[in-house]
Amino acid sequence: MGGEDFAGKAAAEAKGLNPGLIVLLVVGGPLLIFLIANIVLYVYAQKNLPPKKKKPVSKKKLKREKLKQGVAVPGE
């Protein structure tokens, strides 16, 4: 039958490799490549992209923060 022929070919290709090892390689290989690519892209972005601009803090928020800390706000 055709099923036996396919099983024979698969066994010949594996040559005694543990099926668990094959699954690990098939799943783990792309995952490892993905993680390494992400790290490389992250390092590249840190070196080459300009830093993010911080939003300016409003005077109202500054005043509120100083009041929370107990610092007297000048002009009041």
Image (cartoon, helix red, strand yellow):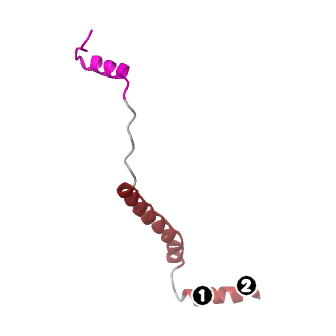
Instruction: Indicate whether 41 appears above or below 10.
Output: above
Label 1 sits on residue: 11
Q: Is residue 72 magenta?
A: yes
Residue type marked 2 = Gly
Question: Which residue lies at the image location 37% right of the left edge and 19% below the top edge?
Answer: 60
Q: Is residue 27 left or right of residue 50?
A: right
Q: Earlier in the sequence, mark 1 or mark 2?
A: 2
Instruction: Indicate whether 54 appears above or below 76.
Output: below
Label 2 sits on residue: 3
Question: Which residue lies at the image location 49% right of the left edge and 76% below the top edge?
Answer: 21
Under tag 1, what secondary structure? helix
Residue 43 badge: none
Q: Is residue 48 left or right of residue 9?
A: left
Between 18 and 26, the residue placed more toward the observer is 26
Q: Quadrant of residue 73?
A: top left
Q: Quadrant of residue 48?
A: bottom left
Question: Which residue lies at the image location 53% right of the left edge and 89% below the top edge?
Answer: 15
The location of residue 37, given as percent across then percent down, is 45, 65
Q: Farthest residue in the top direction?
A: 76
Residue type marked 1 = Ala
Mark 1 and mark 2: span between their CA atoms? 12 Å
Q: Is residue 23 magenta?
A: no
Between 65 and 18, the residue placed more toward the observer is 65
The location of residue 30, given as percent across then percent down, is 51, 69
The location of residue 44, given as percent across then percent down, is 39, 60
Q: Quadrant of the C terminus?
A: top left
> Which segment did they paint magenta?
57-76
Q: Residues within 10 Å of mark 1 (few under 14, many from 20)?
A: few
